[in-house]
Image: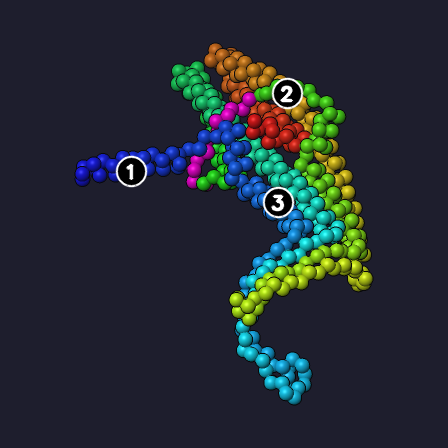
Amino acid sequence: MIGMNRRFLLLLAVVCSAAWAQETGPLRLTLHDAVALALKQNPQVILGNIGVALSEQERLVARSALLPQLDGNLAETDNRINLQASLGLPIPGFPEHVGPFQVFQAGGRFNAPVFDLTLWRRYREARFGIQANRAQEMTLREQAVDLVVSQYLASQRATADVEAGKSRVELAQALYDQAADLQKNGVGTGIDTLRSNVQLQNEKQRLIVAQTQLQTSLFGLARLLSVDPRREIVLSDQVNFFETPPVSAGVTLERAYSTRPELRQILAEQQRAELELKAAGEVRLPRVSVSGFWAEQGLTPNTAIPVYQYEASLDVPLFTGGRIQAQRAEADLAIKQLKQQEQDVRDRIALEVKTALAQLESARNEVTVANLGIDLARQEVVEARDRFQAGVANNIEVITAQDELARANDNQIAALYRYNQSRADLAHSIGQMEALYVK
């Protein structure tokens, strides 16, 4: 039995260790994984979900005001009444007080609105409040996806910079070794070796800067994803070029107007404000309601008899001290404010869509040119090395070719980054970030 327990504890320790190691090991993320994780645990997205749930409860509260209310009551009280204090004077022949005596009562009380337009308007306002909060939630989700995608692309760019930096260090090391060998064999000069060594140190320094930038970018990505900062993040996706079909600016603009959640939120708020304006005016209308109670009442439960009271009331506001007029003015100003916000959002959306389309087309052309430039720069490095090896020229040509290759690498990385970022900007401008990067 003791041996079995030891084996069980050993197995449990191994399983727990494996689980802990898996939890604290590197977190490998594709862009799709990063977006899905952000939508799951980003604090702003969670707050948006809570806001929608709260608005749904507000709707239920507003609906309850339209429905009859019923309360049950069961009570037994002890009473002692001072007659002189109640009547305000002593009455000859009557005692000073009555009691103590008990009263038993069991029954129910109800209240129901019959005609009250303000309650109906508030219920409809709550429904539009749900639409506005859902649009706000979508805005937060789109913003979360936009931030994560941009940070992931920046991390990809930093990763590519590190890889390119390593390649340049390897090339500079090879050229330095080549110059040192030529000098050792009496073919090269000391200045060539020194020049190659300077270039090697420059490339090492650039690599250090690129590695630091990568770490900083990954820290920012971990912050957006609410990941344990002690856990390492490794990007699984490579920087690639994805051909996109041409898009009509007019069609895209109309699509953006219909899908951007910010605009949908403002439109829902406008409808809600219009209902508030109507409700403020309808406060002047009479309100009809019914109420009452029915109970078994007596000095003891055995002597209880039915008692009841039913009431129908008509309430008409006569003087409200300017409250109704102020509420109508407030609602009207809110509508005007929302219309101005709507126009501002429409103008901003149009600018974002047109800018994203122009940048996407430009970035597509930049990628083509950058790919050609890096091919030419590699050919230049090969020819310069051959000329230096043959003793036809010194290594100034080689160093120059190295610099050209480094610039070509930087141009290619930057072009791919701008292209992928432009695709994300276009998706954001038409409200399709989640649709594009979660599918």
Mark identifier at residue 218: none
Residue neighbourhood size for the residue with mark 1, other residues' Cα within 10 Å, grouped as few (<14), some (14–19), many (≥20): few
Residue type at mark 2? Thr
Tag 3's secondary structure?
Answer: helix
Which residue lies under the disc numbered 2?
244
Side (left or right) of 407 relative to 267: left
Query: Residue drawn at (49%, 23%), measured in percent from left and top?
Result: 168
Q: Nearer the viewer, residue 186 or 59?
A: 59
Which residue lies under the disc numbered 1?
13
Vertical position of residue 163 compared to residue 57: above or below: above
How far apart, in angstroms, are the residues tagged by discs 1 and 3? 46 Å
Side (left or right) of 95 relative to 201: right
Return the x and y of residue 134 as percentages of the image width and height. Answer: 63, 40
Say which label, 1 or 3, has the lower sequence index: 1
Tag 2's secondary structure?
Answer: loop
Which residue lies under the disc numbered 3?
56
User: Mark 1 or 3, which is nearer the eye?
Assistant: 3
Tag 1's secondary structure?
Answer: helix
Query: Residue drawn at (76%, 56%), measured in percent from left and top?
Result: 287
Residue type at mark 3? Glu
Name which quarter of the figure residue 261 lies in: top right
Image marks 2 and 3: residues in contact by CB distance under 8 Å: no
Query: Residue drawn at (43%, 18%), measured in percent from left and top?
Result: 178
